[in-house]
Amino acid sequence: MRSSPDLLGGYRPSRSPVHRTPLALKASAVVALSAAVMAAASLPVLGLALVLLAGLYAAAGLLSEAWQPLKLMWPVLLLLGAFQAFAAGPGTAALVTGNIVACVAAARLLTLTTPVQELLDGLVALARPFRVLGADPERFGLTLALMMRSIPFLLGSARDVRQSAMARGLERNPRALTVPVVIKAVAYAQQTGDALAARGIGEAPERRPR
């Protein structure tokens, strides 16, 4: 069964200036751009942000990837835009949906131009100051790594089950669409747990007899 890394924006190796930019700078830029478009709540600012993002995608050699979020999110954006247009007008609808697209595109550019391990190392580094509160940065990183591996697998599982149901004329049968996905998810979780236990990860410490 195939996974679906493209849905989350898998890393695309390159030597572009965007790829070579340090992770801290790229992550700060994503946060700053997202905060700016949300705080400004202005169509001109949104337009400027989208033009800037298009330029960054082009500089990274990934301009064809810039529209991927729209291809993946268009049903949700359509419903949200229709509701906002009805409730507050077309200008607000364009602003709300455009802000979402800008934030998702910015975050996706980060994942497209940064190796997964580098992203995880950066998140673990951010968690280290919380060690004084009892946090375990390494366990946090392991959890994120498992999540980033599991989500594409589960999405791919749902896609394969849907295609199989369509081939049998059962695309409108909720049981045919959900039960195989649940079974595969449970099996995957069991296999992951067994693999971790085999490496001594996640086991509760044994109590020594007094």
Image (cartoon, rainbow, N blue to C red):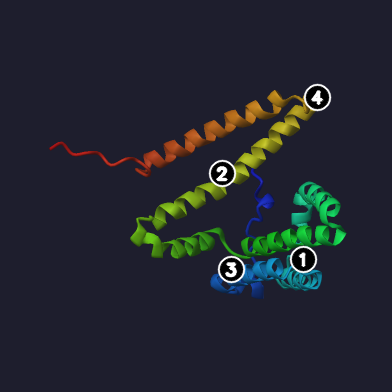
Q: Is residue 1 visible?
A: no
Q: Is label 4 in a helix, a strand or a loop? A: loop
- Alpha-carbon neighbours of circle 1 within 10 Å: few (<14), some, or many (≥20)? some
Q: Which mark is residue 27?
A: 3
Q: Quadrant of residue 175?
A: top right
Rendered position, 184 above or below 59: above
Q: Are marks 2 and 4 in contact (CB under 8 Å)?
A: no
At a point 75% along the width and 33% down the height, the residue shown is 163
Counting residues from the start of the chain, the first of labels 1 and 4 encountered is: 1
For label 4, the residue is 169
Instruction: Tell me the quarter of the image containing the N terminus.
Output: top right
For label 1, the residue is 63
Residue type (three-letter) at the residue carrying disc 2: Ser
Q: Residue furthest left?
A: 210
| In front of the other: 135 or 177 | 135
For label 2, the residue is 150
- Alpha-carbon neighbours of circle 3 within 10 Å: few (<14), some, or many (≥20)? some
Counting residues from the start of the chain, the first of labels 2 and 3 encountered is: 3
At a point 70% along the width and 29% down the height, the residue shown is 177
Cα distance, mark 4 to mark 3?
45 Å
Q: Which tag is nearer the camera, tag 1 or tag 3?
A: 3
Q: Is residue 36 visible?
A: yes
Cα distance, mark 1 to mark 3?
19 Å
Residue type (three-letter) at the residue carrying disc 1: Leu
Counting residues from the start of the chain, the first of labels 2 and 4 encountered is: 2
Cα distance, mark 2 to mark 3?
23 Å
- Alpha-carbon neighbours of circle 4 within 10 Å: few (<14), some, or many (≥20)? few
Q: Is label 1 in a helix, a strand or a loop? A: helix
| In front of the other: 25 or 164 | 25
Counting residues from the start of the chain, the first of labels 4 and 3 encountered is: 3
Residue type (three-letter) at the residue carrying disc 4: Gly
Q: Which tag is nearer the camera, tag 4 or tag 3?
A: 3
